[in-house]
Amino acid sequence: MQGDKPRRPYRVIADQILDLVADNGLAPGDRLPAERDLAERFGVSRPSLREALIALEVEGRLEIRMGSGIYVGACPRAGAIEGESPFEVLQARAIVESAIAEEAARRCDPKAVAAMDRILSRMAEATGDPARSLDLDGAFHIAVAMGTGNGLLADMTADIYRLRLSPFFSRLAAHFEGPGTWRLALAEHGAIRDAIAAGDTGAAREAMRHHLTESQRRFCGAFAADAA
Amino acid sequence: MQGDKPRRPYRVIADQILDLVADNGLAPGDRLPAERDLAERFGVSRPSLREALIALEVEGRLEIRMGSGIYVGACPRAGAIEGESPFEVLQARAIVESAIAEEAARRCDPKAVAAMDRILSRMAEATGDPARSLDLDGAFHIAVAMGTGNGLLADMTADIYRLRLSPFFSRLAAHFEGPGTWRLALAEHGAIRDAIAAGDTGAAREAMRHHLTESQRRFCGAFAADAA
DNA sequence: ATGACAGAAGTGGTCTGACCACTTGCCCGG
DNA sequence: CCGGGCAAGTGGTCAGACCACTTCTGTCAT
């Protein structure tokens, strides 16, 4: 979450707010100072302060009531999983997403297959655009998980994929991702899609595992190049 | 989330934004109109529009790049982890943890097996204590995941198990968990442990699936009793 | 023809100051 | 004591201005 990408400005203020909550030992339901006071305290304008407050409200850390004030939230949303190495991420994905692809094939949902098709056709057009390819890659994997009909599995897939998007991981990945590898990935995606559409659980499982282990193999090559 | 509480104003605009994304068939990575244009289109001021954008960015639905524009996000964040039903949780666990048990058997780590043994012997002593049984149940599942040698898989297992601990889930579960069911669970855990220790990937996978589907079956019985 | 650099245009980020809508607390009257 | 009205405080929103960053285009040099 750190590194290449500058922190979103509202995040900086949001963290200051959280520090204030912690420093003052505020518990869920406790009231924070007013917006005007907080803005003055942190040396920012009120609209900027509000942006941070809204981010924290979306995360469930705060609750904002018009005319009343800002309160510490009762239920912080689940925090981010961080600190795992790229290899762990790829291995975990191979294990979990293979099982998910198998379940998606068992269920064989035409809507999910149609969604995969839409993404695949966009991927075919985007092989020269790394950022777009990456976005669509993530979307494809989530579409597969959606094919299980289980929202939690889709959420989990999105969560692991997010680790894939970390700046560190992305920087390394940039060494091996290019039109060639995206075309390989596209073909591998196609095989996954086909196995799911055919309801072939074993093939779906194996196609996903193949895709993610190939991805890992490509990544290992990139890592060796990076170390040199 | 709805009903009692009036909708947050930025939510109203955020939904308009999501409608625009859907109506225009925008895919992850696609660019939205500029803030000034969106604010004019929706008839609101730019700061108000920004509040909605930030909410959507926090949820991973959008990505905002300074100087560049607003893009559809690749990975909607697990916005509603709490929205999953107990059935979804159990199904997701069956799918994911079966794959994890298989991997643990492939790896066949004596340390992990020893940890499972310690937990199982404590479970045998704790069948009359529901809270303790539950803690040890969770610990066993995490120990299996640790047997993969992959920290991320262990974290994920802990995260899903946490859903298992939600107040709603626990209240329902209280109907079917007792010394009898904990003894059944213990036996099922033993089968998982044995398969992993024997390095039998198929048996480990099947034992975990059996355990979690039995758990689901027991839970369904409890749900029927709760509905009556 | 290609690549590099500079400038313009467009984009998001932030501020100030004003006003509006809502909530809460206090005071007064019945 | 209870209810209503008002004032003060709070969040919600706006307009307009300016700043920082990104992208695109045009020009020049090789």
Image (cartoon, coloured by chain):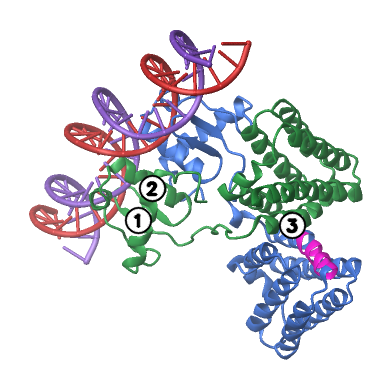
Chain colours: A green, B blue, C red, D purple
Which residue corresponds to mark 3?
A: A91
The C terminus of chain B lies in quadrant: bottom right
Q: Nearer the viewer, residue B31 or B131?
A: B31
> Quick check: B37 left or right of B131?
left
The reply to whether residue B5 is in sight is: no
Q: Is residue A121 above or below residue A200?
A: above
Q: Amino acid at mark 1?
A: Gln
Which residue corresponds to the image point at 52% horizontal and 57% vertical from the top-left? Answer: A77
> Quick check: B190 left or right of A90?
right
Q: Amino acid at mark 2?
A: Ala
Q: Which residues are magenta?
A: B96-106
Which residue corresponds to mark 1?
A: A16
Which residue corresponds to mark 2?
A: A52
Which residue corresponds to the image point at 64% horizontal and 31% vertical from the top-left? Answer: B27
Instruction: Give me the chain letter of mark 3.
Output: A
Whether labels 3 and 2 share one chain: yes
The reply to whether residue A82 is in sight is: yes
Which is more N-terminal, label 2 or label 3? 2
CA neighbours of label 3 inside 10 A, class few (<14), some (14 to 19), many (20+): many
Mark 2 touching mark 1, by CB under 8 A? yes
Q: Quadrant of residue B39?
A: top left
Q: CA distance from mark 3 to mark 1?
A: 36 Å
